[in-house]
Image (cartoon, rainbow, N blue to C red):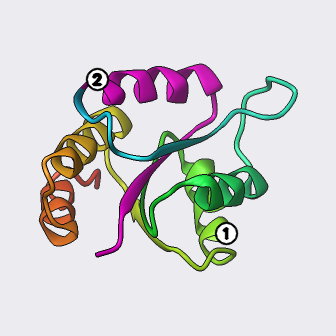
Amino acid sequence: MNKIGIVLVSHVYEIAFGLQRLIKEVAPDVPITLAAGLEDNGIGTNAETLVTAFEENQGQILFAFYDLGSAKMNLELAEELTDKTVHLFDTALIESAYTAAALLQVAASEQEIIEQLTALKIK
C-alpha cells in the first residue's frame, strides 16, 4: 500500500505553517510538507519549491491543497516534474486539508478521501 502525504501550498509561509500546526494536532502520523512563500520571505509560490516539497514528502501519493489561483498553476507545472501521484484539490484550503489529514490518520482509503473532498469543491 502506498503511503499518502499532504502538501500545503500558500503564498504566505505563516499560513501554511499555521495550518500544518493545526493538522498535526489531529493527524500526527500524516506526512506534511510545505511549499509556501518565496525565498526572500516574500509572498508567492513557485514550481521549484513545489517539486522540492513533493520529493521531501514521505508519501508516494500526494494530496495537494492551495490558497489562490497562481498556486494552482505552479502545482500543475510541478506535477509534471515528479514521478509521484499528485491529487490537486480545488477546495477550501483549511477545511479540506484538515479533513484529508484526519481521514488519513484513521486509515481511510485514498478513494474514500477523494469522495469526501469532492463534495467540498469550490465551483
On screen, residue 11 above or below 66? above
- Give the residue furthest to the right: 40
Residue 100 pos. (x, y %):
25, 48
Q: Nearer the viewer, residue 106 or 87?
A: 106
At which x and y percent is residue 19?
Answer: 42, 26
Distance from the alpha carbon under mark 1 to that under mark 2: 31 Å
Structural crowding at the residue carrying mark 2, measured as other residues with C-alpha within 10 Å and reported as few (<14), some (14–19) or many (≥20) = few
**Residue that label 1 marks:** 77
Helix, strand or loop status at disc 1: helix
Q: Is residue 32 magenta?
A: no
Q: Position of residue 92 (x, y in %)?
A: 32, 40
Inspect the image, locate mark 1, and give the three-letter code of the amino acid beneath it. Leu
Q: Where's the N terminus, which quadrant?
A: bottom left
Disc assigned to residue 42: none
Q: Earlier in the sequence, mark 1 or mark 2?
A: 2
Report the residue at 25% width, 54% height from top. Answer: 121
**Residue beneath label 2, please?**
25
Q: Which residues are drawn in magenta?
A: 1-25
